[in-house]
Amino acid sequence: MKLAALFSGGKDSTYSIYKVKQMGHDVKCLVTLFPKSPNSHLLHFPTIELTKLQSKTLKIPQITSTLHSDELVEEMNVLKILLEKAKRDFQIEGLVHGGISSEFQKECFEKICRENNLEIITPLWKINAKEYMNDLIVSNFKFILTSVSSDGLDETWLGKIISTHDISQLNKLSDKYGFNLNFEGGEAETFVVDCPLFSDPVIINKSKTIWDGYRGRFEIEDASLDSNAR
């Protein structure tokens, strides 16, 4: 099936593309909405501009739109317009998104797909969090945390490429502090710097960490693709 992928640059949307390709689907384009602020109802905010680099290394064209409001109605309307464009330009038959457990998000995306006569594929839906996080590492996904906003997650996690040992530590912290191990509740945001789908890894050339004592973010100020890494 020809698919568009709702793409934020984080682990869930990138791994979903990886999974549907394994199923034999053809991801024809990435669909990315740039939200106005972190208050978005549906969308991932940190590092969203860097999805353009990821699109290039994925070798999948990207269609984008910038939102001027955090209102759910506008987010839905703009996404509908982008999917209509994806149907015209890429003849897509369905949409893949990386939702894991948010019924609200799933219902919103299903509604838009029904209105556009598109199938919806959610390869990570209700996946076991610990198995999923370990699968990411086993599948050679390299990702960093670009924001944290939960008890148990301090500034030392920001900008760090997550390892198998880190997954074990996060699992213990998740048990102790009660956050979702896969960060489905927004406890942290991620950014994929390399994976089997990338022709070249993303290199972070300049960044800064902002921490207020409880929450923080890792701001990537400059990044590029390393064509010599393979």
Image: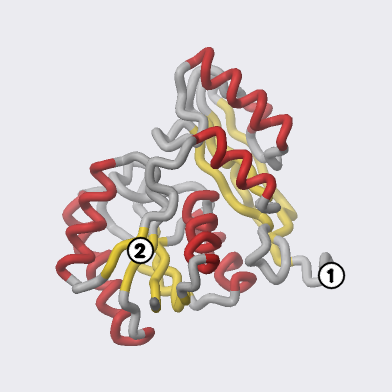
Q: Residue at x 49, y 50 (%)?
A: 12
Q: Which residue is mark 1?
A: 228
The answer to whether the residue labelled 1 contacts the one labelled 2, judged by CB atoms less than 8 Å apart, is: no
Which element carries disc 1, helix, strand or loop?
A: loop
Q: What is the image's colouring?
A: secondary structure
Left or right: residue 14 compared with residue 80: right
Instruction: Categorize mark 1 by other alpha carbons within 10 Å: few (<14), some (14-19), many (20+).
Output: few
* Of pointers 1 and 2, the one earlier in the residue sequence: 2
Left or right: residue 116 compared with residue 96: left
Left or right: residue 139 compared with residue 106: right
- In this view, the residue farthest toward the front is 23
Q: Residue 65 versus residue 62: which sits nearer the camera?
A: 62
Q: Which residue is mark 2?
A: 66
Q: Nearer the viewer, mark 1 or mark 2?
A: 1
Quadrant housing residue 97: bottom left
All told, the count of numbered labels is: 2
| Kind of residue sitting beneath label 2 | Thr
Q: Residue 215 versus residue 103: which sits nearer the camera?
A: 103
Q: Residue 140 versus residue 187: which sits nearer the camera?
A: 140
| Kind of residue sitting beneath label 1 | Asn
Decide: is 175 above or below 119: above
Q: Position of residue 92 (x, y in %)?
A: 34, 79
Quadrant housing residue 131: top right
Marks 1 and 2, how far apart in space? Answer: 33 Å
Q: Position of residue 29 (x, y in %)?
A: 44, 75
